[in-house]
Amino acid sequence: MTAVAEAPSDATRIAADARDRVRFEEEALELSDQVYRVARHLAGSREDAEELVQETYARAFRSWRSYQPGTNLRAWLLRILTNLNIDRGRRAQRAPQMQALEANDYFLYDKLAESDGELTDEERVVERLSQDDIVSALSAVPHDFRDVLVLVDIGDFSYQDAAQILDIPIGTVMSRLHRGRRILKRELAETFVEEGT
Amino acid sequence: MMGRSDDPCAHCEEVMQPYLDHILSDEERREAETHLDECDWCRRRYKFEESLRRYVRQAVSEPMPVELKEKLAALRIPLN
């Protein structure tokens, strides 16, 4: 009896549903800057990133019910986005075989030091690299490494979140991140050397 | 100089990424910091790496175009 008395009417349920959906959409839209910032470097170009973000939001708004409130909405959106990115064939390029990577973690620093004697101000020396240098060096990092690098170092996702978004083991996140950072530094070092000569 | 696993500087390089990611155990972290306190060579390289990460993040952060924001808002499903 009480169960019947407490059962919400259809109208109440519909209203509650609408309220939940509106709240979901608003929360998702509040995250759009952060989603775009990551998308911009997962996709090949600005145009691709814009399309990808639009497709992501269109899909998210349609399938909002599959989002579990209280979980990480930004990671949920990025999961959609990375899947769409793969579906769109942007990932035709497979991860390269483990290429010889002579560069150690100090490679870039050593290159800069080599060209300029011992560096005195580590915090300022990075400013010798231009924004364009960094953007193009990042885009030269192969997809599988770049995805992890962008999620963790630019999107501030945890290893765990990145593993869930990309559907790969956390150990793979760590190894790709490590290599991705080294590749990025190698690319930056090459840019710097090219410009310096 | 370095490049040997028994070299404290080589070990310090190995743990730089996990150190900056804050995933070392307390003991590993202390060990790294003890070395960094004494070794200017490694300390410079850690500082550089830290600055580089920050700088890269700033350099690649592009604000979202305003039109895109509007387009996304327009994708919302209208209430019946």
Image: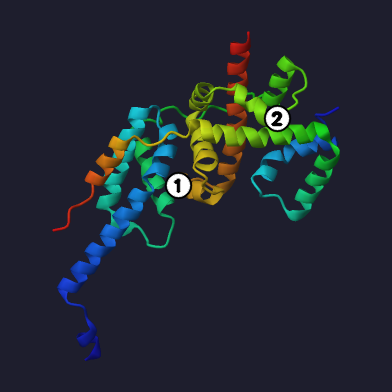
- Farthest residue to the left: give it: B80
Q: Which quadrant would the N terminus of chain A be assigned to in this image?
A: bottom left
Asked whether the viewer can see residue A105, the reply is: no
Q: Disc 1 to disc 2, how far (Cα)?
A: 34 Å
Q: A53 or A179: which is nearer to us? A: A53
Q: Which three-letter amino acid code belongs to the residue tagged 1?
A: Ile
Q: Which residue is mark 2?
A: A122
Horizontal arrangement in the rendering, residue A57 relative to residue B35 (left or right): left
CB atoms of marks 1 and 2 within 8 Å: no
Q: Which residue is mark 1?
A: A165
Marks 1, 2 in one chain: yes
Q: Residue drawn 58% across and 33% down?
A: B55
Q: Is residue A101 above or below residue B5?
A: above
Residue A81 in picture, x, y percent from top left:
37, 42
Horizontal arrangement in the rendering, residue A42 relative to residue A137 (left or right): left
CA neighbours of label 2 inside 10 A, class few (<14), some (14 to 19), many (20+): many
Frontmost of labels 1 and 2 is 2
Q: A69 or B38: which is nearer to us? A: B38
Residue B32 in picture, x, y percent from top left:
78, 44
